Amino acid sequence: MRNKLSPSKINLIIFASFFFVRYFFLIFSNYDNYELQPDSYWYSEQSDAVLRGNFNLLRPLFITSPFFTYYQAIVKFIFGDYWEIVLELSQVSITSISAIYFYKLGLILFKNKKVSSFALIIFCFYPFTFWYVGAFTQDIWFQSFLIIFMFYFSMYLKNFNLKNLIISALIFSLTFLTKSHILIFSLFIPLVIFFLKYNDLKKKIFHIILFSSICFLSTLPYGLYNLKVNGVYVFSSNGFGGLFILGHNEDAYVNHIKTPKIDSDEAKRLKNVDYKIFNTLEDKILKSSPSEVQKIYFEEGLKWIKENPQKSKELLIFNFKRFFTPGLHKSWYDYNTWLLSIILSSPIMIFGYLGLIIILLNNFNKYSWILYLFLSLLLFSLIFYYQGRFKVITLEPILILLSAYSFHKIIIRNFLRNDRFN
């Protein structure tokens, strides 16, 4: 009889496997820490400014969410000339740690080791989940924190346990302080807690208040600092208007609907988000406060919509379709890269959405939070603009779990009818 591996050994194997695969990618891909994501350059500039005593993360479009920039500054301060090596290793480490929670999340959701193990293997080797592991941006930190949050929140929903509620609130705070688009999902969390199948209404209301309070308290240092320096309280980032104008202007329409040839100067300009509207508004923006800037951007976006109803409708349809379309945007990549992305991502999306339908039909109350996570990013895509990178770091881990579940369920239903799924 074989000895079963202890939980600590399983965790070590998962961590080591993910660390090796991701570090192998960094070594042999020949990408540096900046070229995969141009935002890396200005993040580094911001963290340098923090080291010089300027803690203001104000940018032309928005105020940056604080976690990554401040963390990068701390790494630079402590490790000096070796900061890039340490930051890279810490990013590989956090995503490897999140893999342990990913495996445990699968066990909580589906109570099946085969499903969780199958999903873990996909997650380990699926390139989109570690593409940004070496890029000095928020992305891999956000994805990792979100996975850990999902584990503790699922534990809370399972046991109605105060300890797991507090931990999940703390991790969720880290998640939205890393990347603010997840704040849309926070609107659904009270709803999920309220409709839990427990009869103690007072306790549920207390849990909602406690979760919300922990999240709000986590915003106080950065929020009060920005209120004093920039005249606006910032929960994580204040880019509502900036994000809105990014998805609602003439260049945004050309970028997504009438995309120029990849190698053209126009394409390079659009890829760098060098939109003409920003030059038009430059003088006005320079004379305005951060809160006024967001209002200006938002009003300009609304103005463009009113003046271009047909184009704005096309953009809205595009954003909706792209949300449910696998792979990369065909117009921005060569044929082979686009085709490979379709081949890799199509099974994940097809079986993932099939899995979502199955679990919601099976037990809506238990899995409703997953639906709300999808809805929150869909709302972001429709209100602002579709951002493929956001879908990768927000939804693809849970899509992988759902696809493993539905694929395994279909295979078992057809070939091993004696097995049961909860």
Image (tube, rainbow, N blue to C red):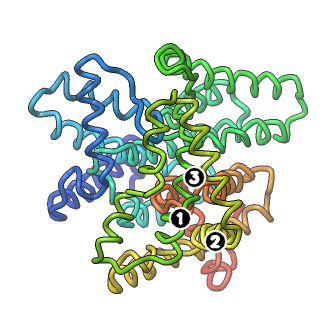
- Determine the CA span between mark 3 and mark 2: 46 Å
Q: Amino acid at mark 1?
A: Glu
Q: Amino acid at mark 2?
A: Lys
Percent of width and height locating residue 176: 53, 36
- Determine the CA span between mark 2 and mark 1: 9 Å
Disc 3: which residue: 107
Q: Quadrant of the C terminus?
A: bottom right
CB-based contact (under 8 Å), mark 3 and mark 2: no
Residue at 61% x, 58% y: name it.
381
Q: What kind of element bears circle 1? A: helix
Q: Earlier in the sequence, mark 3 or mark 2?
A: 3
Q: What kind of element bears circle 3? A: helix
Q: Is residue 352 above or below residue 182?
A: below
Asked if residue 333 can be seen in this view, the reply is: yes
The residue closer to the viewer here, 315 or 24, is 315
Disc 1: which residue: 250
The residue closer to the viewer here, 112 or 248, is 248
Q: Nearer the viewer, mark 3 or mark 1?
A: 1
Q: Amino acid at mark 3?
A: Leu
CB-based contact (under 8 Å), mark 3 and mark 1: no
Label 1: few (<14), some or many (≥20) within 10 Å?
A: some
Residue at 61% x, 26% y: name it.
215
What number is the disc on residue 311? 2
- Determine the CA span between mark 3 and mark 1: 47 Å
Residue at 45% x, 50% y: name it.
278
Label 3: few (<14), some or many (≥20) within 10 Å?
A: some
Q: What kind of element bears circle 2? A: helix
Q: Quadrant of the N terminus?
A: bottom left
CB-based contact (under 8 Å), mark 2 and mark 1: yes
Percent of width and height locating residue 291: 57, 30
